[in-house]
Image: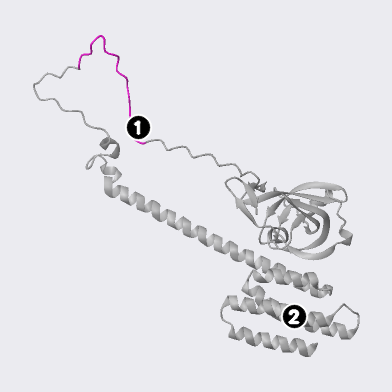
Amino acid sequence: MDRLCAKMKERVALELQEAVDPLAREALLIAALYEVSRTALAELGMPRKSQEYQRARDAVLDLVSSIAIPLVRGGGEGGIAVLSELAEGCADPLLKKKLSVYAQELVAKSRTVAREKAGGARRIAAWCAAVCTVGSIACYLLEYGSPTRAGAGKPSPAAALRSPAPAEAPGKPPTPPPQRSADAPPPTEQSEPLVQKEAAAPAPAPPARGEQVTPIRVVSGQLLVPVTLKQGGVSVVVELVVDTGATRSVVHEEVLRRLPLDLRSARTSVAEVADGRLVRSWIGKVDLLTVGPFAHPSMELEVIPFSGGGEHDGLLGMDFLGKHPHQIDMERQLIRWF
């Protein structure tokens, strides 16, 4: 095992030196993790208490770290799924924990990169809006003059809209208003608006007949979808955030007050909370998870401690969303299932 791991570690290091493109490095490291699963982890086998097994496990741990650490530094989202998959199938508890921690660190790195990109886009948008505002003010001043000279040059835009009354010739009596006959109908006052009213926007069409949709709520930019959980004859409805960045669906520990899920038989894991901390979590199964028209029996959920309040009860991750093609309709606030 020592020779196998050392040889693979050396080969991966040499290939990384030749790979310059970040996507190529990510693909190389993901392929190396799968190779570790097929060879080193398969040869390691089930956990034993012998010293020979512990030495072999240490060699595999060192090999996994040499591959996972560059993958986390690169921040590629493609490594999240493979690290989580290897952690799920690993029988050794120490290796399982190590792989889970690397997966959570990669999730945190990916979210940090996404927040930085979003912040840069907002700054660019604000700068463009400021430039447009300054340009509009400059164009107005060039067209109509500065505020201190208003009325000294060109007429104001409001004055230009009014037609001046015709001037009377000097010495000529004012023209009397036209006389109206007794039988003529009274004049009606009409005024044409300067700007026509915009046509009212048509109401959004309802979903097509037979279309599979699920209503959602939008709260603080988060999409909340109703989810029904059933365990031991008890059903509860919770609201989970649609999160395509989460590999596994998550519920807050508070949900267990309403659902009889026994954590004593659950597996332990590590999860990242909103402020970036890594906390201990549990992975257990519910009898049934239902979202819209889809029901999943024996669905695994990750349970995390949560005391931050808020509108939602957890996250609906890719373990469900990845199996059901869908489209988010923000205007009508619903999910379309295909």
Task: Pinpoint residue 137: horizontal percent, then vertical percent.
Answer: 35, 49
Instruction: Give me the C-alpha separation between circle 1 and circle 2.
Output: 76 Å
Residue 145 visible in the current orientation: no
Give the residues in magenta.
178-195
Tell me which residue sits at (71%, 86%) in the image: 9
| Left or right position of 306 against 107 | right
Q: Amino acid at mark 1?
A: Pro
Residue most extreme to the top: 182
* Picture quarter with the N terminus: bottom right
Task: Name the colouring of the figure.
Answer: one colour
Residue behind mark 2: 36
Residue most extreme to the left: 171
Tell me the quarter of the picture where residue 57 sits: bottom right
Tell me which residue sits at (63%, 63%) in the image: 111
Residue behind mark 1: 193
| Left or right position of 190 against 243 | left
Q: Residues within 10 Å of mark 2 (few under 14, many from 20)?
A: many
Tell me which residue sits at (64%, 79%) in the image: 28
Tell me which residue sits at (91%, 80%) in the image: 49
* Picture quarter with the C terminus: bottom right
Residue most extreme to the right: 49
255 relative to 93, above or below: above
220 relative to 270, above or below: above
